[in-house]
Image: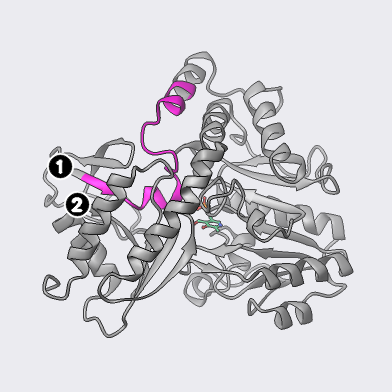
């Protein structure tokens, strides 16, 4: 099927704006379309393919587990889930894990656990935050366009500016939870200041509220540490992860500290597929790869190098982010919106990028992408941003 073919999506609810391309194969940082045309992937399925496409350890884990047992359900013990839970908790907050199938579901679990502990209470989030599309997570996602069509939302959710003053004022005895992304991904890669995270931590401690960090996008090595909270030293009570965890399979996890380790009891919360053996086997393989200190050091150093190079590209007025989670803010005076640039990048340069808004390009390369591939991607981006080339 040619890249220019009109695809018949008439059977699908039109909930996504899709590019006119069908990828049929991936390997490392590269993708191939149905015509065999090769692309460089800096989007990684929106921070999912962090270990690259078809990583041999992930493929092996999935195929071996699928051949042995695909599903058994949560009414029985399952070794991959038990092992993954222990490793996730021991690498972070020291409590326990409750599995979900996605980022939004992991956040639902966190919000429910926090409210159960407080016997009700409010949930505070911050402007520009994104936590998912189900009702609890959506209610904590203060974006008019995403919320308004689906009103009424869940009561007891409030959003404030991500500042020390606003958070300190908003968190009180009624607060059950504060939910924050250490780096706000969907809204354009905005790094929250350490003082903001610290202020949230202090106010939560003072009022007995749970501090939830949503590491769905930033976690698992993307910023050059296994967990993004390590950069600030501010440790949450609850942390949610998803995206990269399954190497492409759907899995999410709520990780707790000791205090919340028994935050649910049988009957409180659950999901048919959550913590299934195949996704958890994939998760163990992914965790092995992204826990490697050499890989993490490289993500930190290379991320910084790429950030500097991005800042020098024509039309880039600001670079935000950390590690391999970067945004290039484009000069608003450019005629071509970033969303159109992404289409031209695919067509003309075979480069897979993401735009979070009309002036923001987001780069989420795999953590295993080579230096040569990154240099090639930057060269392609430079051509795309060259005012002589844009049309
Ligand atoms: C920070 C954050 N939280 C939650 C979600 C929702 O995850 P999912 O799409 O797996 O439900 C996303 C997705 O982009 C995210 O970036």
Per the rendering, the mark at residue 37 is 1
Question: On screen, 31 above or below 344?
Answer: above
Tell me which corner region of the image, top left, top right, bottom left or bottom right, holds residue 142. Answer: bottom right
Helix, strand or loop at label 1? It is loop
> What is the C-alpha distance between the residues marked 2 and 1?
8 Å
Q: What stretch of residues is rendered in magenta?
A: 39-61
Task: In the rendered structure, find residue 385 and report the number of the disc placed on it.
Answer: none
Residue that protrudes farthest toward the bottom in the picture: 333
In percent of width and height, residue 115 lies at: 80, 59
Residue in the foreground of this view, choosing between 139 and 114: 114
Horizontal side, residue 169 vs residue 150: left or right? right
Image vertical order of residue 346 relative to residue 83, above or below: below
Q: Is residue 136 left or right of residue 342?
A: right
Residue at screen point 71% across, 78% down: 164
Residue 87, horizontal then vertical, whole percent = 68, 33
Q: Are marks 2 and 1 in contact (CB under 8 Å)?
A: yes
For disc 2, does the CB lie below 8 Å from ligand 1?
no
Residue identifier under label 2 = 350
Which of the image's four quarters has the C terminus?
A: bottom left
User: Residue 257: percent from the left, percent from the top?
Assistant: 79, 47
Tell me the element at label 2: loop
Q: Position of residue 196 (x, y in %)?
A: 69, 72
On whether residue 49 falls in the magenta region, the answer is: yes
């Amino acid at each position: 099927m040619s890249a220019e073919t009109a695809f018949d999506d008439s059977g699908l609810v039109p909930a996504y704006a899709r590019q006119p391309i069908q990828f049929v194969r991936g390997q490392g940082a590269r993708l191939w379309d149905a015509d065999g045309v090769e692309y460089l992937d800096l989007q990684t399925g929106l921070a999912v393919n962090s270990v690259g496409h078809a990583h041999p350890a992930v493929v092996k884990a999935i195929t071996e587990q699928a051949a042995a047992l695909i599903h058994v359900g949560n009414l029985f013990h399952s070794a991959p889930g038990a092992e993954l839970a222990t490793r996730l908790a021991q690498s972070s907050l020291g409590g326990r894990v409750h599995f979900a199938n996605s980022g939004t579901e992991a956040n639902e679990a966190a919000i429910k656990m926090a409210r159960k502990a407080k016997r009700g209470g409010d949930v505070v989030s911050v402007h520009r935050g994104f936590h998912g599309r189900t009702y609890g997570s959506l209610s904590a996602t203060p974006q008019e366009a995403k919320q308004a069509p689906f009103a009424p939302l869940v009561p007891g959710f409030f959003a404030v500016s991500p500042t020390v003053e606003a958070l300190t004022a908003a968190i009180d005895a009624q607060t059950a939870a504060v939910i924050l992304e250490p780096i706000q991904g969907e809204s354009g890669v905005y790094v929250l200041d350490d003082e903001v995270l610290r202020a949230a931590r202090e106010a939560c401690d003072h009022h007995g509220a749970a501090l939830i960090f949503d590491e769905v996008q930033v976690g698992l090595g993307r910023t050059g540490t296994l967990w993004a909270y390590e950069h600030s030293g501010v440790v949450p009570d609850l942390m949610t992860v998803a995206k990269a965890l399954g190497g492409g399979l759907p899995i999410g996890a709520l990780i707790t500290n000791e205090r919340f380790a028994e935050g649910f009891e049988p009957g409180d919360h659950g999901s048919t597929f959550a913590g299934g053996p195949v996704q958890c086997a994939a998760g163990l393989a992914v965790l092995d790869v992204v826990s490697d200190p050499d890989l993490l050091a490289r993500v930190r150093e290379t991320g910084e190098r790429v950030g500097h190079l991005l800042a020098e590209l024509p039309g880039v007025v600001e670079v935000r982010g950390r590690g391999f989670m970067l945004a290039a803010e484009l000069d608003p005076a450019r005629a071509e919106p970033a969303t159109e640039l992404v289409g031209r990048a695919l067509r003309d340069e075979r480069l897979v990028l993401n735009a979070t808004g009309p002036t923001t390009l987001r780069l989420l390369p795999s953590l295993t992408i080579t230096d040569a591939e990154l240099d090639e991607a930057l060269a392609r981006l430079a051509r795309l941003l060259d005012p002589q080339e844009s049309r």
